[in-house]
């Protein structure tokens, strides 16, 4: 039994005898599924300190919003759990379900848990997802299709009477329909609970919460560096998938820089053609030997980092995204030839102090013979020389930036599982 499973048992032990409802429960939850609970704010505040003393918690976060609190738990055995405590059913200014009605319709299942009725579950999933421009996940549609014909008929009749939606097969709700969304919104606006005065108050409350959340729910950046063939793409894809599936994070992958401005060759070949040429061209093949030309090229790309850091901050970090960089600014310091530059590395090294520094920076390396077995793009001598320079730079940055909350780690990437284990160990550190 995992520490996560033990903690969940502890949670429901604390909920016993309280007026809670377990939402989105089908009886066949996935191992990495989160938990949604309808529970009043006072009861949540009462049990939360007890829950945070549960066995096996390595680290945790609590995000408090106007209509819900979110709990993120990291356990010693590398399991993770997200618990959402909902105080009501709201989407910005709209109240889309009655808390009292859902509470009164709850039923106790075979495991002794108070779960949402199928009629209220379909309504909650439909309204919540479609108000957020998203379809209902397929696993819930399969669950509805497995219910008795009588229950299914009751659910479909409810959607027809309340929202004018004629549902044949449940799969129809697996595709977002804008026209049905507006029909739902019109129906919600007609309810007394969504009188314009009440909606105005909720708008103010919602956006005040958004402003407060900017300070506590920010995203972060993670950079991955390494010579070609070091396995960056494989590791980045594994990290991206785990962040999205396991840790429920929004993720964007950027190549090398913010890309607020296009690569220089885009002015000659066009953006799409330039990107295709860059993707297919072997590294370090540029013929530029001019110091002035290199300075101008570097100044152009440095402007992208300098200006782009504000774009990344407002576009992604303030919206809780994690930005994964496939290569970063360190290439200009260690391997200017890759960007067709002939520069003294002291200039880009000095200017690094003025640009955004990712919280986690990983340099992935492997023995030259291992890299050459993956890709034969660089000679063995170049691989060794670049690896030594990257490791030296990361050692220096790690010493200089110690105590700032930034990490610079060189990881020998020959065993994927070992590499990912080190990455997740440091990811949990920055979640403190």
Image (spheres, rainbow, N blue to C red):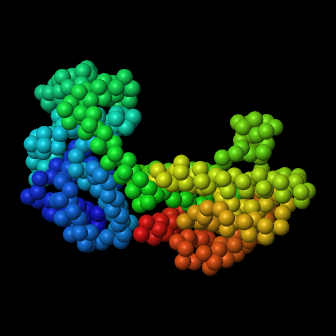
The answer to whether residue 89 of the structure is visible from this angle is yes
Of the pair 141 and 230, the residue shown nearer to us: 141
Q: Residue at x 15, y 52 (%)?
A: 20
For residue 142, say whether it is visible. Answer: no
Q: Residue furthest right?
A: 290
Left or right: residue 412 versus residue 29 is right
x, y percent for residue 267: 79, 39
Depth check: give the residue in front, 136 or 413: 136
Q: Position of residue 168 (x, y in %)?
A: 26, 21
Q: Looking at the rendering, which quadrant does residue 160 occupy?
A: top left
Q: Residue at the front extreme?
A: 197
Q: Left or right: 364 with respect to 206?
A: right
Q: Is 95 above or below relative to 395?
A: above
Q: Give the quarter of the image for residue 61.
A: bottom left
Name the residue rendered at 57%, 52% in the picture. 312
Instruction: Identify the image quadrant of the N terminus.
Output: bottom left
Point 25% across, 62% down: residue: 5
Name the image quarter holding the C terminus: bottom left
Q: Is residue 100 above or below residue 393?
A: above
State left or right for residue 249 relative to residue 51.
Answer: right
- Residue 86 is left or right of residue 213, and the answer is left
Determine the image quadrant of residue 212.
bottom left
Residue at image coords 37%, 51%: 208
Of 323 and 194, nearer the camera is 194
User: Can you give x and y, in whole percent of width and height, for residue 338 in the image?
Assistant: 77, 56
């Amino acid at each position: 039994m995992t520490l996560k499973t033990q903690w969940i048992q502890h949670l429901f032990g604390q909920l016993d005898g309280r007026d809670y409802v377990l939402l989105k429960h089908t009886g066949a939850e996935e191992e990495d599924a989160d938990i949604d609970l309808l529970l009043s704010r006072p009861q949540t505040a009462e049990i939360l300190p007890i829950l945070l003393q549960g066995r096996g918690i390595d680290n945790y976060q609590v995000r408090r919003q106007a209509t819900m609190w979110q709990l993120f738990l990291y356990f010693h055995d590398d399991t993770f759990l997200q618990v959402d405590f909902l105080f009501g059913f709201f989407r910005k200014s709209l109240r889309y379900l009655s808390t009292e009605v859902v509470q009164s319709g709850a039923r106790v299942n075979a495991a002794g848990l108070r779960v949402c009725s199928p009629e209220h579950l379909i309504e909650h999933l439909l309204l919540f997802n479609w108000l957020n421009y998203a379809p209902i996940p397929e696993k819930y549609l399969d669950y509805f299709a497995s219910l008795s014909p009588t229950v299914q008929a009751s659910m479909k009749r409810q959607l027809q009477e309340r929202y004018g939606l004629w549902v044949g097969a449940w799969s129809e709700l697996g595709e977002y329909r804008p026209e049905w969304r507006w029909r739902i919104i019109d129906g919600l606006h007609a309810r007394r609970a969504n009188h314009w005065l009440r909606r105005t108050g909720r708008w103010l409350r919602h956006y005040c919460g958004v402003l407060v959340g900017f300070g506590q729910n920010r995203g972060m950046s993670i950079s991955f560096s390494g010579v070609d063939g070091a396995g960056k793409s494989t590791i980045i894809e594994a990290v991206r998938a785990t962040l999205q599936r396991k840790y429920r994070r929004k993720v964007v992958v950027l190549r090398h820089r913010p890309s607020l401005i296009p690569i220089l060759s885009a002015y000659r070949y066009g953006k799409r053609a330039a990107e295709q040429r860059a993707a297919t061209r072997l590294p370090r093949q540029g013929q530029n030997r001019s110091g002035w030309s290199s300075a101008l090229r570097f100044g152009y790309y440095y402007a992208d980092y300098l200006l782009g850091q504000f774009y990344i901050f407002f576009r992604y970090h303030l919206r809780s995204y994690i930005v994964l960089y496939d290569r970063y600014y360190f290439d200009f310091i260690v391997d200017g030839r890759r960007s067709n530059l002939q520069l003294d590395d002291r200039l880009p090294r000095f200017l690094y102090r003025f640009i955004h520094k990712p919280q986690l920076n990983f340099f992935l390396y492997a023995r030259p013979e291992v890299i050459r077995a993956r890709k034969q793009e660089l000679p063995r001598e170049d691989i060794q020389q670049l690896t030594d320079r990257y490791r030296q730079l990361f050692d220096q940055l790690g010493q200089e930036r110690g105590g700032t909350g930034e990490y610079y780690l060189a990881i020998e990437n020959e065993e994927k599982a070992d590499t990912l284990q080190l990455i997740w160990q440091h990811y949990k550190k920055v979640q403190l």
